[in-house]
Amino acid sequence: MKNEIRYAGFWIRLVASFLDTLFLAVPIGILIYVLSGGEWFDFSQYQQNIQAAMSGNVNKALSDMPKMDRTWDIINLIILMTISIIFWRKYNGATPGKRFVKIKIVDAKTFNNIDNRQAITRIFGYIASVLTFFIGFLIIAFREDKRGLHDLLAGTVVIYDKD
């Protein structure tokens, strides 16, 4: 069975993440913005910063950062994490982006579907992968089994789906 396994590498996983941003994160972000009544993120300040940067006033652009509401940030994060876990459990380890590029998350030893503990550990492992200055993601490119820090913590691996 192991001879048939093809590990999904860094670039295909990056494409899947980009697609998940388009399919999941952007629509949820828009929903959170609407639900917050525009309080989540100050787009007017962001637009002013872009204009200042484009006119060469980089110091002004960097000094006046857009106001963000941390409560809505946390709500957005919780919703994204929950939806990711639901997709992994319901659709055999695949979010929409992973399904589109035909890869999925499985248990690293058995190559079976992941369980709830692995899904939750993996989602929090993303935070660890980010906090290591993204090294947790970059190691995917250098490991033979293409596992990131979040995979190692959760006992998962991403493989090409045969179906």
Image (cartoon, rainbow, N blue to C red):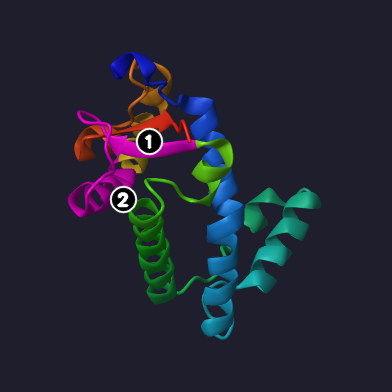
**Label 1: which residue?**
133
In this rendered view, identify the residue nearer to me: 31 or 53: 31
Which region is colored magenta? 103-128
The residues tagged by marks 1 and 2 sit, at their Cα atoms, a distance apart of 17 Å
In the rendered image, residue 87, in percent from the top left (x then y), is placed at 41, 56
Q: Residue furthest right?
A: 55
- Residue at the spot 66% in from the left edge and 64% down from the top edge: 46
How packed mark 2 is, by other alpha carbons closer than 10 Å (few <14, some 14-19, many 20 or more), is some
Judge whether 118 appears above or below 132 on screen: below
Q: Quadrant of residue 158?
A: top left
**Label 2: which residue?**
123
Name the amino acid, label 1.
Phe
Viewport quadrant of the N terminus: top left
Name the amino acid, label 2.
Ile
**SS assignment at label 2:** helix
- Residue at the spot 57% in from the left edge and 86% down from the top edge: 37
